[in-house]
Image (spheres, grey):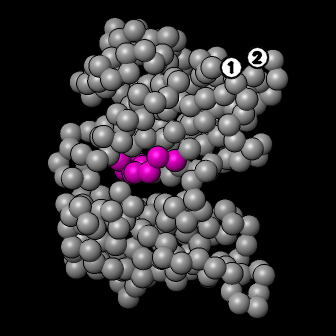
């Protein structure tokens, strides 16, 4: 295994910069949830890229933001911790938005916390803008910090995703594979399933509600006497009665749809038929309550 490299990378960037989508594009399967709402990624989900010449373990962190709740603070701590542990950081900046104070804040934080970690500048979503704008973005990005490399990519049309993979791999130390071949993520299945349900529940909800939703898979087991059906029992937590009504929808239609959408994805993930038993519970102000946060896995 001469020259074989293995190690860790993470993507940073403002909320919605395209970090989760890029992780999925690199890993080639759906491991991190994506949505058009900012700050939907809460767990540190690893995707593993297996190549002939190395193994790249991607850690997907939530976006760094101004903390307003206890959950916000914990998320920020988690991000900083991750930055100082990885071999290389990919700093994502979308091509369709001006480099702004949010990016400069992250650049400054990176230089403080991860002085020695090489940072690769990634201009994401290049499919959304003309080439000229990508070139301008490149120049703007160069001004905010020292990058090891800068590379424009599109996770949607696959533009330069391979190039990025190689650039990240080049920054890893030489060493044997850290995970068995074929593993795509070490995130427990129950967490992935909870994320799929939360993703389905987030479709079409607005304002503060996305941050009030948490999902916990309570139990998961094959149906007795059957080898083709798995029972999944999950609870969807909201903070208030009014939010419960929104998620339920008229005569429970909305919740039913959440169940149908996420069940299909869970079946694809597990490769089995699934019976999804999904309930809504109210956990009053869970984002501000340390005990409840722990119970929900934060
Ligand atoms: N057109 C286009 N859209 C993209 C691309 N990458 C991501 N998006 C979209 O941008 C939005 C945000 O992408 P995410 O991958 O969820 O962003 P994120 O940085 O992980 O967001 P947080 O989890 O909030 O930090 C989603 O609607 C994606 O579909 C891309 O290459 N091209």
Q: Where is residue 288 in the image (x, y as percent from the top left)?
A: 19, 60
The outermost residue toward the bottom is 225
Q: Is residue 119 above or below residue 146?
A: below
Task: Identify the residue position indicated by label 1 in the image.
Answer: 174
- Secondary structure mostly taken by the magenta-highlighted segment of the chain: loop
Name above or below for residue 167 compared with residue 235: above
Question: Are the residues flagged by discs 1 and 2 in contact, CB closer than 8 Å?
Answer: yes
Point out the stretch of residues depicted in magenta. Answer: 36-45
Give the mark nearer the N terminus: 1 vs 2. Answer: 2
- The reply to whether the magenta stretch includes residue 37 is yes
Residue under pointer 2: 3
Is disc 2 placed on a helix, strand or loop?
loop
Above or below, 234 against 24 in this view is below
**Is residue 169 rendered magenta in the image?**
no
Residue 17 can be seen in this image: no
Give the spatial CA distance, label 1 vs label 2: 6 Å
Q: Which residue shows up at 37% across the image and 65% down it?
A: 296
Dot label at residue 183: none
User: What is the quadrant of residue 243 in the picture?
Assistant: bottom left
The quadrant holding residue 47 is top right
On the rendered structure, is 162 left or right of 73?
right
Give the number of marks: 2
User: Dot 1 lies on which element?
Assistant: loop
* Number of residues whose C-alpha sits closer than 10 Å to that of mark 2, classed few (under 14), some (14–19) or many (20 or more): few
């Amino acid at each position: 295994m001469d020259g074989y490299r293995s190690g860790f990378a993470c993507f940073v960037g403002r909320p919605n910069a395209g970090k989760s989508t890029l992780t999925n594009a690199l890993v080639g399967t759906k491991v991190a949830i994506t949505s058009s709402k900012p700050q939907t990624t809460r767990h540190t989900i690893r995707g593993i890229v297996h190549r002939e010449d190395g193994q790249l373990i991607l850690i997907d962190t939530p976006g760094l933001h101004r903390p307003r709740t206890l959950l916000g603070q914990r998320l920020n701590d988690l991000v900083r911790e991750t930055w100082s542990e990885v071999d290389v950081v990919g700093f994502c900046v979308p091509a369709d938005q001006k480099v702004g104070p949010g990016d400069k804040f992250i650049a400054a934080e990176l230089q403080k916390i991860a002085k020695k970690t090489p940072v690769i500048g990634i201009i994401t979503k290049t499919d959304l803008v003309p080439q000229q704008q990508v070139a301008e973005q490149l120049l703007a990005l160069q001004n905010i910090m020292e990058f090891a490399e800068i590379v424009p990519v599109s996770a949607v049309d696959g533009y330069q995703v391979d190039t990025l993979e190689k650039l990240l791999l080049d920054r890893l130390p030489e060493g044997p594979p850290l995970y068995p071949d074929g593993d795509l993520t070490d995130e427990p299945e129950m967490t992935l399933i909870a994320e799929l349900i939360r993703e389905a529940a987030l479709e079409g909800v607005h304002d503060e509600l996305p941050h009030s939703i948490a999902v916990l898979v309570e139990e998961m087991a094959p149906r007795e006497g059957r080898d083709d059906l798995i029972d999944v029992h999950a609870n969807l937590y909201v903070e208030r009665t009014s939010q419960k009504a929104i998620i339920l929808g008229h005569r429970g239609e909305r919740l039913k749809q959440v169940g149908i959408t996420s069940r299909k994805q869970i079946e694809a993930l597990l490769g089995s038929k699934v019976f999804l038993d999904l309930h809504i519970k109210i956990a009053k102000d869970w984002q501000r309550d340390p005990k409840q946060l722990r119970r929900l896995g934060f």
